Image (cartoon, rainbow, N blue to C red):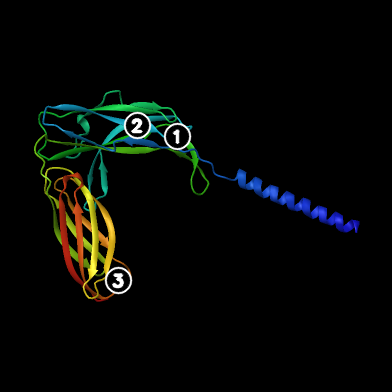
Amino acid sequence: MLQNITSLLLMKILRFLILFFSVSVLFFGQKVQAQSGISVSPPRTYFSLNPGEDDRKKILITNVSDVNTLELAISFNDWKYDEFGTNIVSDPNTSSTSCANWITIISGNTLTLQPKESKEIEVLMNVPKEISADDVHTTMMYITQTNPVAGQNKSGENIKISIRTGVKIYQRLNIGRDVNVEFTNFVFDKTQNNLVLNIENAGNVWSEGTIKNEMINQENGKQIALPDLVFYSLPNDKRIVYIPLPKDLEKGTYIATSTLSLGDNDQIKIAELSFSNDK
């Protein structure tokens, strides 16, 4: 009897020790990382200036970390969209559309932000008297952390974390706006099971909006919602937009409609395509 009680006590103690050890391993094995990041507002800045003119804009930069002080440096690069709308970044002042060397940061190109601190920087654009004939000039202003903090990757390895964010800066002449975005082609790619929409920005301003897509089965009247897509473009951009179709799309004849709403410009463009799926 005494032996049984002793055995039960030993088993309870052993279970307690195993539980305590497991909890300790879980606690000490957690990968704790301090939240770190930079917030900027606005993320895009626009200037309407003619040659020889200048103007200033303010950008608010915030350190969202609760614990980390950020040492930040400001630099500039050229950029453009490729035919699929992806940002392509290049060295500053290498593009005819660059305005990288027209920009001055009034307070200097470095700053320090304490945890949760915000600071406004003033961006001065001074347009030269002679510029290229491009409708829009741009640059990407990068804000980069120069004092990396310790952290861990998904594998648990110790790494140094440095944060960088970008602000797009645009300049165009202070003249009338010509918003002219057109659909130039709309086809069904049976091999990739996509609709392919071609768009061209023939205006003189940057244009952005949302492309809403839907289609209807002409044989049974069934409506099918397709993904909405965000659209950005600069003057003279030509864009290829892929609209994925459902993988289990049944055979039949369809009418697809894509509607582009151009932001605050109250312009709407509509493309319509009839096609047959015989797979």
Q: How far apart are marks 1 and 2 (CA)?
A: 12 Å
Q: Distance between the residues labelled 3 and 1?
A: 47 Å
Name the residue located 51 percent from the left edge and 40 percent from the top edge: 33
Q: Mark 3 points at which residue?
A: 249
Q: Mark 2 points at which residue?
A: 61
| Residue 267 position within the rendered picture, expressed as x and y whole percent measured from the top left | 15, 49
Give the residue type at disc 3. Leu
Q: Distance between the residues labelled 2 and 3?
A: 47 Å
| Residue 217 position within the rendered picture, expressed as x and y whole percent measured from the top left | 24, 71
Q: Is mark 2 on a helix, strand or loop?
A: strand
Give the residue type at disc 2. Ile
Residue 232 in sight from this viewpoint: no
Q: What element carries label 1?
A: loop
Could you say which is closer to the camera, residue 89 or residue 114?
A: 114
Give the residue type at disc 1. Ser
Q: Mark 1 points at which residue?
A: 65
Residue 1 in sight from this viewpoint: yes
Quarter holding the N terminus is bottom right
Quarter holding the C terminus is bottom left
Q: Marks 2 and 1: in contact by CB < 8 Å?
A: no
Q: Is mark 3 on a helix, strand or loop?
A: loop
Name the residue located 57 percent from the left edge and 45 percent from the top edge: 30
